[in-house]
Amino acid sequence: MSHSNARKGILRYGPWSRANHWIIAISFVLLTLSGLALFYPAFFWLTALFGGPQATRIVHPFIGVFMCLFFVIQAVRFFKANLFRRHDVQWARQIGDVLNNRDDRLPPVGQNNAGQKLVYWIFLLCVPALLVTGIIIWQPYFAMAMPRNLLRFAAMLHALVAFVAIVTLIIHVYSAIWVKGSIRAMTRGRVSHAWARHHHSLWYDEVMRGERRGDGSALPGHEPDDDNTGRRHT
């Protein structure tokens, strides 16, 4: 590994991964705001952000479909990286140490820890459920042809799943702020060697083995570095 690369740190998320992530995040925030405006009267004032109640009702499902397309790309790219391993189970069992910042007691983890993987799987379940129920209640395109009981059930399930997804997002954002350096990874792409070694030591060791071999080794879902060396520093 060159001295210049050491100063730059390790590439954790490539440009496309970061762009895709922020497209999904911004879309989900817009869906949350517009959905709350339509669902609960106390948030009706949020319709002003979208040009009024009628415009909010129109754009909400289109934003949802748009977000789902990018979510599919992200879900496929990061599928292998979010499979649970034995060390993830031990990490989850020691959640008390996680919450109390006793990092020295935690087992080494890979590219993502068990909490990050859980967020992935919750959204992998929630997004398709939101898409299907949203299509069922989408007026005037599909809802008019649906039985009334199905519409009621779909609307209730849509709201329940949306609540789970919103709470999961809040926890995800809080965790990213709590662990210093996580936000930087998703804005600039790179993390320091010390951060990677401390929070994701198994992943760090794999990256370093790839560096020493010089064979461009990387974990699935990550993009090549932009330093024209042909290597990957995920």
Image: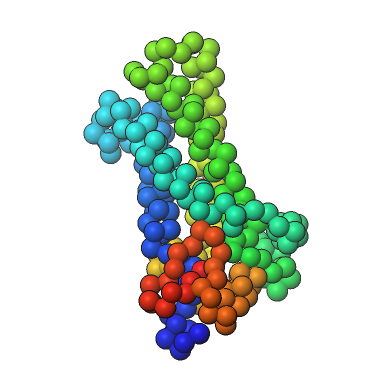
The quarter holding residue 57 reads: top left
Q: Is residue 101 visible?
A: no
Could you say where residue 15 lies in the image, as x and y percent from the top left? 38, 63
Q: How is the image coloured?
A: rainbow
Residue situated furthest left in the rendering: 51
For residue 125, side relative to residue 12 (left or right): right
Residue situated furthest front in the rendering: 215
Which residue does the image show at 57% across and 51% down from the upper left? Answer: 79
Q: Which of 19 and 38 is in front in this view?
A: 19
For residue 114, side relative to residue 72 (left or right): right
Which residue does the image show at 49% across and 62% down from the upper left? Answer: 222
How many marks overall?
0
Q: Nearer the viewer, residue 219 or 165?
A: 219
Vertical order, 230 against 98 (above or below): below
Could you say where residue 23 lies in the image, as x and y percent from the top left? 37, 50
Could you say where residue 125 lies in the image, as x and y percent from the top left? 57, 39
Vertical order, 140 against 126 (above or below): above
Which residue does the image show at 40% across and 18% down from the upper left? Answer: 142
Could you say where residue 182 lies in the image, as x and y percent from the top left? 50, 65
Q: Is residue 36 visible?
A: yes
For residue 190, side relative to residue 118 (left or right): left
Vertical order, 37 against 25 (above or below): above
Which residue does the image show at 42% across and 71% down from the upper left? Answer: 225
